Structures are given as structure tokens and as C-alpha cells.
Amino acid sequence: MAHRIDLPQFGSQPQHPSPSVHRSKDQRAGQGTADGHDFKRLPSLPRTKRPVLSSHRHDANPAMALKVLQDIQTAVNSWHQELRQVVGQIQDLYLEGPIVEGWLEAVPEGTGTAENSEASVLRHADPQDLEGYVDQHWGQPQAGTHSGEPAPRYNLCRLDADGRLQCQLCPVDQLAHITRAVARHQRLRQHLSQKHYLESRLKRAVEVLTRVRGELDIPPSPEGP
């Protein structure tokens, strides 16, 4: 008698995926939905405009500031150098010889125009022209002495502290020396005027630059003023 063997039967039973697989799919689906939902909720941000860089001369420009400072430094150095030269010229002028304040006027012997012309030259001439006039007329023997005519006479004139005219007869033998001394005084006045001008410019530069330094809140250096 044959033995019956019970074979396993394979039915079409539905296969259920593991819970882990279901959770993984649900999580992925939920995550994707959440992510998409979050992207839709992002606010619309305004777009920023690109800044426009201007090259106008009055805008903040370090090169322009340095150029202005360089111009000021060049001018100040030039004034300082000129002032040193003028001071040296004044010192040389004092070492050159005596300096007399005033002017020479011919003593009128008549009404001739030659004396009036000489008086104008001696009073209003440029210092170099005055020294040339001296060399021409007194650098050689006086012609009037050889011809028997009296030598021309001159007064040294000046204004006192009250503005009154003071005149003094100038000896003939000292006329050339006094004329040169008067010319030195005229040159001295020119040098002193130039010295005063340069000193005023430098003083003004110090005042303006000091004020600008304070307005820019720049502290002075320890060794500076």
C-alpha cells in the first residue's frame, strides 16, 4: 500500500510587504510633500539693485586727496626755500656796506632841467639803475672841476618820525658812498617786502591746515605743534 505524501500547497495569497517598507515609503512621500509645501510657502524677497559706482571728482577718492596734499606740500616747500634765500640776501646786504634810508636831491643852482632830471633819477630810480648812475658820474674825476665849474651839490633827504622833510648837504667826496648806501636801503626794502609776503603765506598755511586737521579729528603728532 502506497504511502501518501502531503506536499505543500502554494496558493495565491497576497504578499504583504514588511512594515518597515511601508514606513519608508510613507516617510519618503510625506517628506517630499512637506518639502514641496515648504518651498511654496517661501516669501518673495525683493531683488537688490546693483550699486552704481560714480567717478565724479567730488566723490570719495583717495588719489584726489593725496594729490591735493602733494600740491600743498610743493607750495609750502617752495615758499620755505624762497624765504631762506631772501633771508640770506638780507644778511649779505648788511655785510656789503652801510645802509642809509633816504634819497639824494640836487641842490638847485638855477632853473635848468638837468638838475631836475638828476633829482628824479636819484630819488625814484631802481637800485641797480642808481648804482649805475653813481658809477657813471662819480666813478671818474668830475669834469666840472677841470673846467673850472663848481661840482654839483646834493642833499641827503629823508622823512622823520613825524613825516617832516629833513635834508642834509652831502659832501662831494662822500657822494658815491652815500648813493650806494641809499641804493642798498632800497634793495633792503624790496627784500623785506618779499620776506613779509612769504612769512604771511606760511603763517596762513599753518592756520588753514591746523583747522582742517581739527575738523577731520586727526590728532597732532607728539613732536608736532
Image (cartoon, rainbow, N blue to C red):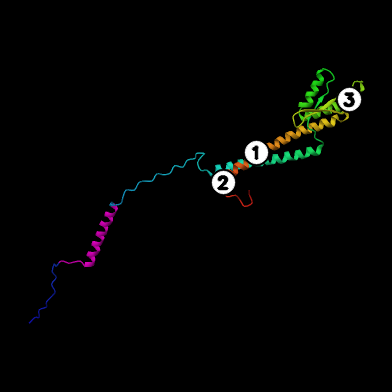
State how far apart marks 3 and 1 are (Cα): 49 Å
Residue at the far front in the pictured view? 162
Q: Is residue 22 left or right of residue 164?
A: left
Quick check: marks 1 and 2 in contact, CB under 8 Å?
A: no
Label 2, residues with CA under 10 Å away: few <14, some 14-19, many ≥20: few
Quarter of the figure with residue 70: top right
Name the amino acid, label 3.
Gln
- Circle number at residue 142: 3
Residue drawn at x 74%, y 34% is 189
Membership of 75 in magenta stretch: no
State how far apart marks 1 and 2 are (Cα): 20 Å
Name the amino acid, label 2.
Gly
Nearer the observer: mark 3 or 2; the answer is 2
Residue numbers of the magenta segment: 14-39
**What secondary structure do most residues of the magenta stretch adopt?**
helix
Q: Does residue 74 sit above or below 21 in this rendering?
A: above
Label 3, residues with CA under 10 Å away: few <14, some 14-19, many ≥20: some
Marked residue nearer the N-terminal end (1 or 2)? 1
Count of picture labels: 3
Residue that mark 2 sits on: 214
Name the amino acid, label 1.
Arg
Quick check: marks 3 and 2 in contact, CB under 8 Å?
A: no
Residue that mark 1 sits on: 201
- In the rendered image, residue 99, in percent from the top left (x then y), is placed at 80, 35
Assign a secondary structure to mark 2.
Answer: helix
Marked residue nearer the N-terminal end (3 or 1)? 3
Marked residue nearer the N-terminal end (3 or 2)? 3
- In the rendered image, residue 84, in percent from the top left (x then y), is placed at 71, 41
